Amino acid sequence: MSGFLVMYIALICYPYMFFAHSVKHKNYIAYSTTDMDRNIYSIVDKSTANLSASEINDTSIVNKFFLCDNYSLYFFFSPKSRKAFANNYSIIHNIYLSRGDVKNNEACKMMKIIILSANLVN
């Protein structure tokens, strides 16, 4: 049992094998299971602009967000936040997003749609 727990925590910290595509822009790295639209750059720019006015803004930290293309994958990485649009493991700077649609700047969960760029800074 403890071996499975260690393996699960390792996968939460290092989920890269589940996400074949990545894009680095500013102090963000976006990971996705599918190829990402070029709109990812404007999403990061909007998120950076929203965060720049905040006192918690730290440009030396590289934030990693993972766009889950299905609910099962999101649930695997965020079991206690399965009804949320996103889950942030702040200690390791991993943000998991449910059903992220980069082309339309949206995240979708249970028939509700929110703006993806606004969700990255929350």
Image (cartoon, rainbow, N blue to C red):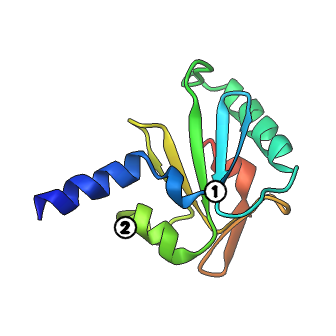
Q: Mark 2 — residue?
A: 79
Up/down of 7 relative to 64, above or below: below
Residue drawn at x 42%, y 37% is: 92
Residue drawn at x 49%, y 44% is: 94
Left or right, residue 74 beside residue 5: right
In what element is the residue under mark 1? loop
Left or right, residue 122 beside residue 72: right
What's under tag 1, amino acid-wise?
A: Ala
Tell us which disc is closer to us: 1 or 2.
1
Q: Residues within 10 Å of mark 1 (few under 14, many from 20)?
A: few
Residue drawn at x 66%, y 35% is: 28
What's under tag 2, amino acid-wise?
A: Pro
Work out which quarter of the rendered image holds the N terminus and state it.
bottom left
Question: Which of 28 and 86 lies nearest the eye of the viewer?
Answer: 28
Left or right, residue 111 beside residue 64: right
Disc ID at residue 20: 1
Disc ID at residue 39: none
Q: Residues within 10 Å of mark 2 (few under 14, many from 20)?
A: few
In what element is the residue under mark 2? helix
Up/down of 41 relative to 104, above or below: above
Residue 34 quadrant: bottom right
Residue 45 quadrant: top right
Inter-mark Cα distance, 1 to 2: 22 Å
Q: In this view, which residue lies farthest toward the bottom?
A: 111
